[in-house]
Image (cartoon, grey):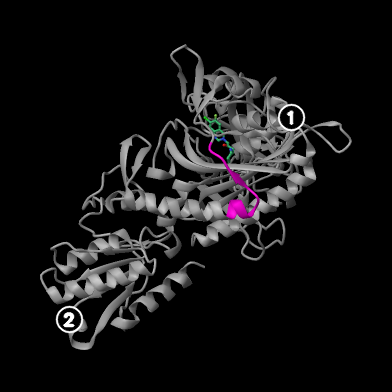
Amino acid sequence: MYFSNLFAPTLREVPAEAEIVSHQLLLRAGFIRKSSSGVYTYLPLAWRVLQKISDIVREEMNKAGGQEILMPIIQPAEIWLESGRWHVYGDELFRLKDRHGRDFCLSPTHEELVTDLVRSNVSSYRQLPLYLYQIQNKYRDERRPRFGLMRGREFIMKDLYSFDRDEEGLNLSYKKMYDAYGAIFKRCGLDFRPVEADSGAIGGSVTHEFMVIAESGEAQIVYCPDCDYAANVEIADCLPSNPDNKREDTIKAKEKVATPNQTTIDEVTNYLNVSADKLIKTLFYQADEEIIVALVRGDRMINEIKLQKMHPSLTLEMASAEKIKEITGSVPGFVGPVGLKKIKIYADEEIKSMVNAVCGANEEGFHLINVQPNRDFEVFAYGDIRMIEEGEACPRCQAKLKMARGIEVGQVFKLGTKYSEALGAKFSDEQGKEQLMVMGCYGIGISRTMAAAVEQNYDADGIIWPISIAPYHVVIVPVSAKDDFLWEKSLEIYKELQEKGIEVVLDDRDERAGVKFKDADLIGYPIRLTVGKKLKEEGKIELKLRWDKEAKFIDLQDIAKVVMDIIASGMN
Ligand code: 9G3
């Protein structure tokens, strides 16, 4: 490819809306262009990367027994009504009507569609297990699309669905996919970790997310430096710590004290000269139509995913100040569990062992001290509802857990019979008895994986593509476009490399070498060959790897071999 033909409009500056590196660099290096909020065109360089990621995914899915299909993007409302999800998802589901006024949606995922396909075409145990997958655009009307391809409204996903005879079969399928995901992300040159995760609204029991470790990641994970335990903080189990105040002996009578204008944890702990782990943090939530209260120790954070598991509800939001005033007669900052009537109080395990605690008095300007759980207020249920923190003990090996941020690039779910039951996907088993198929689903964000690769591989000059997914392997830079000798030689090398199947760009522009080097570094080709005066003097070509500081000089006749070896080693 001659660079002067390549449609890769590079930018000097990027729009302020591009907050993270991958968004900035993919725009600047001419990989993507925005069409509308959260919707992008993949320009030639990006499309080459996406096809390489897709080919790696395809190879591993086929190896695992997957059969590739292509399902519709437009789905009829009927199957979403059957699964009961048509009314579960709100504005995030792109809905449309056809000319006859019939309801459809643009696919955010394909559980319903693939189950409808299979229920109509599979009826015997002999046809199971069956793995069907596709690589296709998905649509989710995110309230706030951001971070470029990381959270778009249209994105490319590989989604595979497994159909098994029983739980045991599903466990086998899940393991196959889990292992295939490990191979895929390794081949893409990513530093990733599978983490235990929350199965969320789609239900199903077990699920793992594959996280690419990156500071810009929206997900927070804990991982153990000593064993392979890792979990999304949303579901990471916490062990109650026994605060030192347990040693306090006398339980005192509760007392109301004036704490004028002291509303935050810090203000109250300073004013009353107590540590935060003596406080009870009282949080009011609107769970669908019901108001519930959650209690965690003053030095902890609430974990709403865990709270929702204790008190399942469609929506869970912080209650409004008006609601709180209506219930407690007070304002946030002075609220507490004592004296609340007919409200379910969910308390974190650590509340149980608190002695002489401090909490709001449900009266503006006052707090209560020496409060005793169970004596002074009734807890509806105790449970682990707090956010895990760095340094807590690994639930497997007790080592100190570490925190990291991650970009979720893949998810594997055990769905069980959630969809086969809802849509009646059955098969006759060896005894001729009718059984529900047992399903799993497995997604990879193809476009998000490209962005994640950039988040993990860049420097001040631009992108540093892993060889396995680079848009091209080599860029050839003649230092002068006017020198016929250099141009002839560059052309020779270009042709020789192409004959060997190497993907090469020849920067044929009539530009200074410095400009060509800058663009080469920005776009991020793994290998740069500079054809300059060393060739005339010593018959050598300068070879520079994008991730190395130093260049080296190679004899002209060895270039193709050296380049092929570098590419072969990078395709681990
Ligand atoms: C919707 C909308 C958004 C959604 C879903 C449904 C996420 C939805 C979960 C999944 C689970 C797996 C197969 C591939 C891997 C992930 N966001 N999910 O079901 F209607 Cl608007 O998609 N699906």
Magenta highlight on residue 145:
no
Residue 470 picture quarter: bottom left
Label disc, if present, on residue 404 of the rendered structure: none
Q: Which residue shows up at 34% across the image and 66% down it?
A: 498
Residue 77 in the image: state x and y as whole percent: 56, 20
Cβ atoms under marks 2 and 1 closer than 8 Å: no
User: Which residue lies under the disc numbered 1?
Assistant: 380
Magenta highlight on residue 62:
yes
Work out how far the residue at label 2 is from the one at label 1, CA to CA, in angstroms.
81 Å
Label disc, if present, on residue 533 of the rendered structure: 2
Q: Which residue shows up at 64% across the image and 22% down it?
A: 84
Magenta region, residue range: 60-70
Residue 561 in the image: state x and y as whole percent: 39, 78
Residue 290 picture quarter: top right
Which is more N-terminal, label 1 or label 2? 1
In this picture, is 346 found above or below 195? above
Q: Which residue type does callout 1 highlight?
A: Phe
